[in-house]
Image (spheres, grey):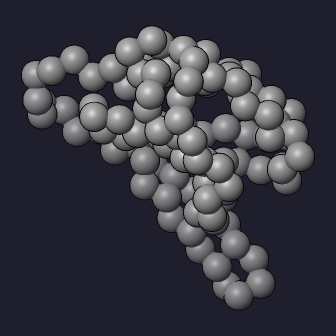
Amino acid sequence: MVWLLVSNGVCIDSTGIVLTISGVGIGINNLESISLYPNPNDGRFVIDVGQENIGSIYRIVDGVGRPIAEGEITSDQQKFDFADKPKGTYRIQIINADGVKTLSVVIQ
């Protein structure tokens, strides 16, 4: 996912676009099966990574790219509680030997 941030000095807005590159590699990518639910949510959500992705690293950044959390995936259904964070859209990166999967989550 590519993110564009636009600022006029007073307001900031962002948008994202997903780029898909096909035909590269022949291996199985375990990142494809990762899902996040519920979305949108109240700050409490689950990322279903499957057993093959336990040990991966997660990184969560806010709408302007500031990191707010990072750690290791320790369960095939990793639970998060960000109910104390401001409402908005956050990006979650799951990082392992297969690459990086980026998910968006909306906290309402």
Residue 90 in the image: state x and y as whole percent: 66, 48
Q: Residue at x 57, y 56 (%)?
A: 15
Q: Residue sitting at 22 percent across and 39 percent down?
A: 21
Q: Residue at x 77, y 50 (%)?
A: 88
Across and down, in percent, residue 48 comes to 57, 17
- Number of labelled discs? 0
Q: In the image, 108: left or right of 29?
A: right
Residue 22 found in image quarter: top left
* Residue placed most toward the observer, 49 or 36: 49
**In this orientation, which residue lies closer to the viewer: 77 or 86?**
77
Instruction: Residue 86: give x, y in percent of width and height.
Output: 85, 53
Q: Is 65 positioned to the left or the right of 81 in the image?
A: left
Q: Is residue 107 visible from the viewing direction of this image? A: yes
Residue 37, located in which quarter of the rendered image?
top right
The relative height of residue 14 versus residue 11 in the rendered view (above or below) is above
Q: Is residue 48 visible?
A: no
**Image quarter (top left, top right, bottom left or bottom right) of the C terminus:** top right
Residue 50, placed above or below residue 85: above
At x 61%, y 59%, the residue is 67
Task: Note whether 95 is above or below 15 in the view shown.
Answer: above
The image shows residue 89 at horizontal and vertical percentages of 70, 48
Closer-to-camera residue (59/26): 59
